Amino acid sequence: MKKVTHLCSLIFTAVISFSLGYRTTTMGEAVGSAIKKYANKLISEGAILAPVNAFGDTTQYVVAISDDLLCGVSQGRLKIFAKNNVNNVISSYWTSYRKPHIFEYYKGYIYLVQGSNGVWIFDVRNLHEINLVKKLNIPVAFYAEIEVKEDKLFLVNTRTNSLIVLSLANPEEPQEITQYPLPESTGQGCKVSIVDDRIYILCHRGLAILDAQDLNALELLGKTDIQSKISLGAFIVYDSYAYVYAGHEIRVFDISIPEAIEQKTVIKATWCSHAVLRDNHFIGFGDNGVYIYDLSDPLKPERVRKHYNNMPGYFLIGKSKDYIINNDGEVEALTGLPYFPDSQLRPRFAFDAQNIIIRDKFAYVFGIGELRILDISQPSNPKQTASLPVSTGGRQTVLIDGDYLYTPNQIIDISKPTKPSRIKRLSGGTGVTIKDNHLFIAKEKTLEIWDVQTPSKATMIKSIAFEQKLNKIFAHKDILYLGFYKGKLRSCKLEDDLTLTTLDEIELAKTAMGIIMNFCIEDDFLYVALNADGITSVDIQNPHNLKTYARFNTSQFSEQTEVVDAFAYVADGSGGILIIDMLEKGFEKKIASYPTTDWTRAIAVSGYYVYACDSDNGIAILVSNLPTQK
């Protein structure tokens, strides 16, 4: 908590140092009303978003740095966490590299592969603060593997297509010992493995073997080309054989005579980017899952275990040792091989996050088939208090009204956040809103109206058909705003007999991908996330005359937005998190952004904290320096 408090202090101190200005505009009556409300709000020229923590993010590759602590890497975060609780993150460092990657550890330093950005060196001797101390400006391949042997670091420079050997006598300042140009036919190198006195280098188009008895006089012993439609993946050496993922195959090469490398066997397999050797087994892992092969018969690798999910959640893979995670989140050294009781079973601790809503000190996070409730009273250290099997998708609306949480699929009693219960199944759909004692569900080309005066006895009382697909719905005062899938917005008066009278209709989409993803409202403005068309605001002060302003085209796909004090916090898919200043209509501007590690599907704001659903990497928690009412 001390680190987070210090971070927040730095952030807010920085705000004072920036040149500050008032947000002003001269547009429209509704805008004028907003200006009066926010006239005294000061903001910096550039807002700040800084990561605080993440909860449920993928951790595959780890190394023990003490008896009690592990250092692990997810798709975008290097972190130190406790063995007695995998969610107890002591310190972490966000990186810009979004693919599963591995690292080498040497005497308190981490050497982390960063693709074209080279290799980053981190000092992890201070457990409470991971320090980036050096960036080796040596480009390596996308799924590269480097190797530390004794006090030497081996890697391949993709720009020069050469093997580089560095001395780690000073771990922060590696010094080059030698450089060896690789054969042109092998293409750019990506993986290095050292066994005895030989260096094995798997490249994009082949395998090379070097004699490393004298590092100052490396000698090429043999090479072979490997043809594959996609990049070569995981690679291990076992006795006299090399095992290479080439496309969706594992190819077995006899390397007993380096001058005459010979391909022996090809078996079908699911592609993996990395692999480790365990006795006579190798474990392949990466984007597609975890696959274990028995090498008792070296020429006939047999897959004996598989786990399709790319978030193990049950065990952690290390370079030489693996760990099992028990039901209490404790890590224990694994003896033998991990067992997957059900290849489709969801992981315990790493989890999928598709949608989020916050009420008081609790965050309600929806993944595929599961609701997790997190206590966020300390945002730097969230704790899961409950989970519940549910039926809901990432793009469905979720809302809270009183003691109940509503989705198009169910009603959940959250009067006791530590003991949620599903009290009613609904018929499904994509959007929901609630007004008085009626729940409205957008479902295909119909609008269903349910009586929820007694939520556990909810009953559908009416269905209204439309000519096109309805995606989202929002209630404000006595008006319903219907968001059709292809970007049309319609305002309707809700009559006493629950019929709808159309007041106005406007087109928000500019392209075929301008899909209405979600609504949120502040003052008399309806803010709309439009997928590939970015975000826009609609003046709804007069529902008979809707007025839309110029949209702000985000970098990727606007999945969801939440607006606080006319700042739009946007979940922008592969574009991460954005903050857009929406006050000056027609002059909207991006003032902050932060790349997340996966596809950002949903977002919620509470106080100065921003919570983003990061798909397969759980929840990313960031702090903002912007003024907020929440």
Image: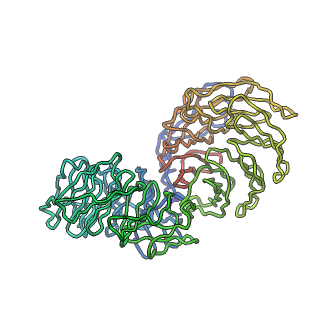
Name the foreground residue: 34 vs 518: 518
Determine which quarter of the picture holds residue 233.
bottom left
Which residue is drawn at the image coordinates 53% and 62% (left, top)? 343
Figure coloring:
rainbow
Give 24 or 384, whichever is nearer the viewer: 384
411 vs 282, left or right, is right
* Picture coordinates of residue 277, whole percent (x, y): 36, 68
- Residue 125: tell me if it is visible: no
> Is residue 629 placed above or below 109 in the rendered structure?
above
Q: Position of residue 582 (x, y in %)?
A: 58, 34
In this rendering, the answer to whether 505 lies above or below 188 is above
Please indicate whether residue 459 sits to the left or right of residue 363 in the image. right
Q: Quadrant of residue 449?
A: top right
Percent x, y for residue 595? 47, 46
Please name whichever residue, 413 or 463, is drawn nearer the observer in this view of the structure. Answer: 463
Which of the 4 image quadrants contains residue 290? bottom left
Q: Residue furthest left?
A: 217
Position above or below: 173 against 441: below
Mark count: 0
Q: Position of residue 516 (x, y in %)?
A: 62, 35
Residue farthest right in this picture:
497
**Would residue 85 be seen by someone viewing this image from the given angle?**
yes
Q: Residue at x 37, y 59 (%)?
A: 274
Q: Is residue 107 left or right of residue 525?
A: left
